[in-house]
Image (spheres, rainbow, N blue to C red):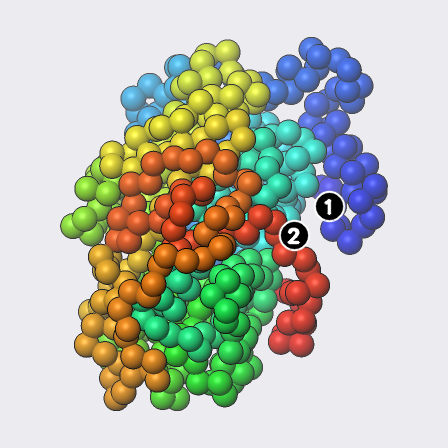
Amino acid sequence: MIFVPLCLPNFLRRMILSLVCCLVLAAGGCTGGDTRDYDEYARQGVTASEIRLGSSLPLTGHASYLGEQTLRGALSYIKYVNESGGVHGRKIVLDARDDGYDPPRCLANTQQLMIHGNVFALFGYVGTPTTMRILPLVEEARIPLLGMFTGANGLRIPFNRYVINVRASYYQETGAAVRHLVQDLGLKRIAVFYQYDAYGFDGLTGAELVLRELGLAPVARGSYIRGTNDVTDGLKRILEERPEAVVMVGTYEPCAEFIRRADAAGLKAVYYNLSFVGGEELARRLPHDLKSPVVLSLVVPPPTAPEAPRIMQVASDYVTHLKRFFPDETPNAVGLEGYINALVLVEGLRRAGPDITRETFIDAIDSLSSFSLGGTNVSFSPRNHQGMESVFFSVLRGGRFELVNDFRTVLAGGLKDGEPANKIKGAANKNESSADKDRSSANKDGKPVNAVLPPVVPPGTASPDIVIPDAVPSEAARSKEAGQGGAP
């Protein structure tokens, strides 16, 4: 087994990664100029009867629900395709390995899959710190990585031909949420509670950037260490400032712990969570008598919501196939994401034709300029590898998250025992924002957006709902948080 410590100098890491690629190419494949050897490497994992894919995701540990549901959602469609004869006569074989949401284990799994697993592509990874850890290996080996359950900006900027994102980004989620909190609800005092790692930093940065555009800044920042439920320090920092809303960038167990304890301490605030939290598991861990609303952003609708078939017809297909192949599972948004990732994967395999290589597969994905999910389109191009832009919002009611048509209804019924200092003011003036004119160069293709509840527009369209920065902020800004927890 070969490990590649990220603390090594870049030139040493490149040398080790090149060695890994040479091992994959086998003897004689390191010459670089031998086209025949590269062509054989580009077909690795493809035989007359099957196409092998590799995945590393948390199947045990505190994020296991996210890994299990992502995998089962994807397998629901893959099993259906295999039952129907596969793709060009080949069955899809998915070698899924448990990493426990631990970056070093994810890296080791990926190296094993590439060297000994004989995989054609990497698929269905879960988590920002884990997926970001393998990115240098993906770049060096030129192996496709598709359908990750993460909205990390580092997987989008700079553009990478071999990295294919299907879902909207965390910057888009936090951007839309913060604007609604400020402009629709009139809230100004916003805190951020985040996981102290690459995932948390991504959400923190996204929230800070949009707050800055609105002339604001977080009133408090609190963090916790990945893999723990110790929210005491982060909760204390945030309670001291009595915010009106808390942007939460974490997983279901620590976020539920934070909300329960903050509610017990008397904090009246809107608790907003990113999609990665795992809404079903978060709801299951929260009491029904909370004094404040809990909001969740989603990049796909809840599959059993009455509105889901209108927004995305494949949600119904997912429910049907999940019941058939995993009858004990309950449909959920995490699984629907996995199902859609598999849809995109299979369509790319089909369009690449029977004589498929890694390069023709990427070209086939690039040709999906308007792939319909039944009400929502997935669109890629040679310079845009994020298929969807949609963001939806839901609020916890009666133990489950329900979609909302108007963000102002988040505070329907008010906050028990009082409201924030700033009452609901209705929609703010949405005609001005210089940031609305500056969109990310990572997504250059304007595409139709079919999202509702509420809609999020594609890059390049004037709207205050979202700001996508042009570049990843520097680590210098993040280093100021070093005193709020140990290294992840």
- Residue at image point 45% right, 42% down: 460
The Cα atoms of the two marked residues, 1 and 2, are separated by 8 Å
| Residue 102: percent from left, percent from top | 59, 56
Quadrant containing the N terminus is top right
Considering the numbered disc 1 on the image, is that residue within a helix, a strand or a loop?
loop
User: Viewed as shown, does residue 318 lie left or right of 430?
Assistant: left
Q: Give the mark nearer the N terminus: 1 vs 2.
A: 1
Task: Classify residue 142 by image quadrant.
Answer: top right
| Residue 76: percent from left, percent from top | 32, 37
User: Viewed as shown, does residue 486 lie left or right of 227?
Assistant: right
Which of these two is toward me, 226 or 99?
A: 226
User: How many residues crowd around disc 1 within 10 Å: few (fewer than 14), some, or many (20 or more)?
Assistant: few
Q: Do the residues bearing badges 1 and 2 touch, measured as CB atoms within 8 Å?
A: yes
Which of these two is toward me, 401 or 475?
A: 475
**In the displayed structure, would residue 253 be above or below residue 176?**
below
| Residue 131: percent from left, percent from top | 57, 47
Instruction: Inspect the image, locate mark 2, and give the three-letter code of the amino acid beneath it.
Output: Pro
Instruction: Inspect the image, locate mark 1, and give the three-letter code of the amino acid beneath it.
Output: Phe
Quadrant containing the C terminus is bottom right
Task: Classify residue 160 by image quadrant.
Answer: top right
- Residue at image point 33% right, 65% down: 428
Q: Which mark is residue 3?
A: 1
Farthest left residue in view: 306
The residue identified by callout 2 is 104
- Residue at image point 39% right, 15% down: 89
**In the displayed structure, would residue 320 be above or below residue 354?**
below
Q: Which mark is residue 485?
A: none
Farthest front residue in view: 432
**In the displayed structure, would residue 209 be above or below residue 110?**
below
User: Viewed as shown, does residue 236 lie left or right of 430?
Assistant: right
Can residue 207 be seen by looking at this rendering? no
